[in-house]
Amino acid sequence: MRVTMILPALTEATSPLFRPIKYSLFPPLGLATLAGYLDPDDEVELYDEHVERLDLAALPTPDLLVLQPYITSARRSYEIADHFRARGVHVAMGGLHVTSLPDEAAAHADTVFTGPGEDAWPRFLKEFRDGVPARRYDSGPQRTLAGLPPVRRDLIKRERYLVPNSLVVSRGCPHHCDFCYKDAFFTGGKSFYTQAVDDALAEIERLPGRHLYFLDDHLLGNRRFATALFDGMAGMGRLWQAAATVKSVLEPDLLERAQAAGLRSLFVGFETVNDANLAERRKDQNIGRDYSAAVRRLHDAGVMVNASFVFGLDQDGPDVFDRTVEWAVEQGIETATFHIMTPYPSTGLWRQLAAEDRILHQDWDLYDTRHVVFRPCGMTARQLEDGYWRAYRDFYRWRNIWRGAAAQPGGHERLRHLAYAGGWKKFEPAWDALIRSRKVVRALPVLERTLAAFGGRR
């Protein structure tokens, strides 16, 4: 059987001008994971439009085309699907957007999948080979990662990614924020589950080099699993990055084990500096937590902070942008990611705003957390969008990068701050040149040296 797998590019990643490095960070692990279920004699090609341009007409005609759309790549996904269906190819489609709007996707696919695919995908492959594939496969309630085959990393063009050693050792998240796409994705079954620790460690052992990036929504979400994983990683000499919550950072001992295993940078969802927003959006894991204490705890462990913030929540006013940036700079946060609140289909936030007639349109290309697609409460749409862009500009001004570095306690930490924050946002032309050379991985040693040189507890 000949199989073609394509990760269509997000709309915001297709600019003919600068290509931000964040769209060339990670390879398409979801598709490479599904490829692990194929037979050894199947012919499979894996394409990622974020790092390569495809001439659809020039591609061979496969027996099966597999697409994984996100919301802002839905239009492109449907274009690709329609092109191949016109050539008689069976098109299978799954992922976040398909799970949220399966009927929309089904108009462009022969088979759609809802929810995580580890249980439904093998069933589909057998039925497809038998000539009786169903139109729709829904993930069952008893989800597991037991027996997961190794990810087909041989299909990944490693040289085109800054972080080719990305991996996922769990699925979902134990929390249920009502604006989160992932919560809707896991409806109907377990919403958080992990690999066996030995399987996760075996996957890590297979990866070359030092650097790893865990793409799990919440790597520290299961304390028993995380503790065993970090203990197993101790002594491997790895340097790694991951995501977790304020709550987990403040828990005793867990961060220390992660740092000893090589943690050097953590993505943390602070989301808002307005406490009233947290309960409204069911961000329970942040309620009553001391954000400043979490940052100090990370910095004391030698771990850098990538802070996530969302603007446009109902309790936000026009002052939220400056207050958020000022707080983040004063804390010495190394990098920040800002978002405009976006109501994704099938989430609690979507249902609320739809009931209040506040959703402006369903142009999925603009649901990229950079455009306002709903009517805000505390400000105008123009104020929200302008404030979002101002927050990025202000946080990454050299003046504020220097201020953030000055908030660090020592010379090494200040150098690390300057190197990391400046390198991330101030050298986009250099990143663009690397992306166009198709050799982004050449910058990985610089990242490793930055993480290695300034890590470790004070």
Image: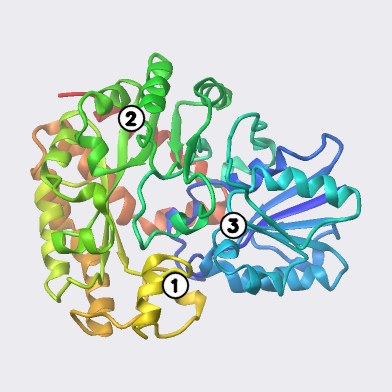
Residue placed under numbered mark 3 in the picture: 95
Q: Which of marks 3 and 1 is in front?
A: 3
Q: Does dot 2 land on a helix, a strand or a loop?
A: strand
Q: Residue drawn at (11%, 64%), measured in percent from left and top?
A: 323
**Closer to the camera in the image, 264 or 33:** 33
Q: In this view, does 216 lie above or below 260?
A: below
Q: Is residue 118 above or below residue 329?
A: above
* Colouring scheme applied when the structure was drawn: rainbow
Q: Is residue 427 above or below residue 194?
A: below
Do the residues under discs 1 and 2 have CB atoms within 8 angstroms? no
Quarter of the rendering containing residue 57: bottom right
Label 1: how many Cα within 10 Å (few below 14, some 14–19, many 20+): many
- Type of amino acid under label 3: Gly
Question: Which mark sits nearer the N-terminus, 3 or 1?
Answer: 3
- Quadrant in the picture for the C terminus: top left
Label 3 – label 1 distance at C-alpha: 16 Å
**Closer to the camera in the image, 315 or 12:** 315
Residue placed under numbered mark 1 in the picture: 367
- Type of amino acid under label 1: Tyr
Q: Does dot 3 land on a helix, a strand or a loop?
A: loop
Label 2 – label 3 distance at C-alpha: 29 Å
Residue placed under numbered mark 2 in the picture: 263
Instruction: Give the percent coordinates (x, y) of residue 408.
Output: 11, 39
Question: Which mark sits nearer the N-terminus, 2 or 3?
Answer: 3
Q: Residue drawn at (65%, 72%), measured in percent from left and top?
A: 103
On screen, residue 97 versus residue 304, left or right, reads: right
